[in-house]
Amino acid sequence: MSSAFGDFGPLTERRRAENARRQRKRIMIAVGTVSIIIILIVMGGAALTYSGKSSDEEDGDSKGSSPAKAKPSGGGGGGGSHPDMRVVSKSIKVMCAQTDYKDACEKSIGKAVNASASSPKDLIRTAVDVIGGAICQAFDRADLIMSNDPRVKAAVADCKELFGDAKEDLNRTLKGIDASGKDGLAKQGYQLRIWLSAVIAYQETCIDGFPDGDFKDKVKGSFNDGKELTSNALALIEKASSFLSSLKVSERRLLADEAVATEPHPEPALGKDGIPEWVPDGDRRVLKGGGFKNNLTPNVIVAKDGSGKFKTINEALSAMPKTYSGRYVIYVKEGVYAEYLTITKAMANVTMYGDGARKSVVTGSKNFVDGFTTFKTATFSKNDDITE
């Protein structure tokens, strides 16, 4: 009896120790399980947040909407978003297909345009705007040429003057595009092309002023981009009416989906007398021919024999009032006038006439062989510098 109860004490202790180990094991398992659940909850929340963001972005990309669309403003009604650059790129490709220098066209417009420029008018304006940077660099390179050759120096001086003329005609073109309405670009295309054609002439004249050699080759190469971009802009303006007519349905409709018409570009409307309709009635009578002299009353008379107010044409031009309004008429009597005339911007509406092509003669002896640039050999020239 005593021996049986004597083994009971150690057995009880072993069972208590085993129960304690099991209890600690359960607690450790429970703590580990809770920790794992907490970690999964945290990771699941982070994954859910990231997944939600990606979903929004994917939805936005698939619908072509801007990021701002997912964040509507407090003003309520959302306006239409601009087309993305893929739409603009397609429009650029279709328009540039009409030009001689397609790669230069796509590269220049694509680099300068943004997603808000969706209409042909916007793209044409960009095509004109990028010309300025190209010719500015070219004229600057010509201006940096240093040489003791008087002909090179004269050519550099001409390029400076021609650059001012080119910038002015480019600005006129841009203003003409900006001022044109929905269909105004096609109507003004004739005048816009005149200004852009002059820009090409200024670049060619700058090049031609240099004598043959390394300087001329370098200047010619520097103007390649400017001439290509100007040529492209001319082609785009010429086709403006076709582009605009192909997009009458909607400004946001892809240009690539429209067939470009081949209708001829509009020329200025002429009256029955063959004179453009925009010419005022008073000037129209002067241009009709016939009694041309009878329709004009000269402000001053130039006569080499001294019978007029001035003996030289330059004297008459210098005496022209600075604030004169209207047409200023100079009558040049019979005689040979050996002088070079420069009409400045301040001399607006100057009309000059003589007694006939073989009677009232303006002549000079400047030529390229003697060291003058061709630009400076003309007996009549224009200068936009009003200070001269």
Image (tube, helix red, strand yellow):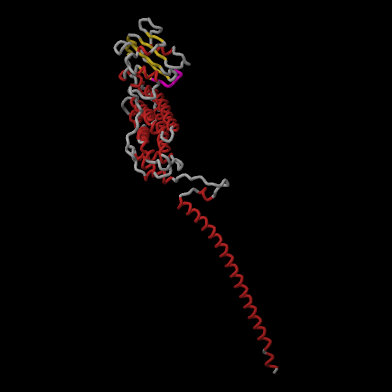
Q: Is residue 310 above or below residue 7?
A: above
Query: Which residue of the protein is positioned furthest toward the bottom in this rendering?
Result: 1
To which quarter of the image does residue 319 belong?
Answer: top left
Q: Is residue 219 magenta?
A: no
Residue 54 position in % (x across, y down): 50, 55
* Quadrant assignment for the C terminus: top left
Q: Is residue 384 magenta?
A: yes
On the image, the x and y values in percent for residue 147 come to 38, 24
* View extreme (front): residue: 272
Residue sitting nearer the eye, 53 or 331: 331
Residue 75 picture quarter: top right
Residue 92 rendering spot, x and y as whole percentages: 39, 41
Farthest left residue in view: 358
The residue closer to the viewer here, 164 or 282, is 282
What secondary structure is the magenta-colored segment mainly? loop
Q: Identify the residue at image location x=32%, y=24%.
A: 211
Q: Is residue 84 above or below residue 24?
A: above
103 left or right, relative to 33:
left
- Residue drawn at 41 percent across, 18 percent down: 349
- Quadrant (top left, top right, bottom left, bottom right) of the N terminus: bottom right
Tell me the residue at 32%/34% (across/down): 264
Q: Nearer the viewer, residue 254 or 173?
A: 254
What's drawn in magenta, residue-wise? 382-388
Q: How many marks?
A: 0
**Camera-side residue: 306 or 19?**
306
- Across and down, in percent, residue 260 comes to 34, 41
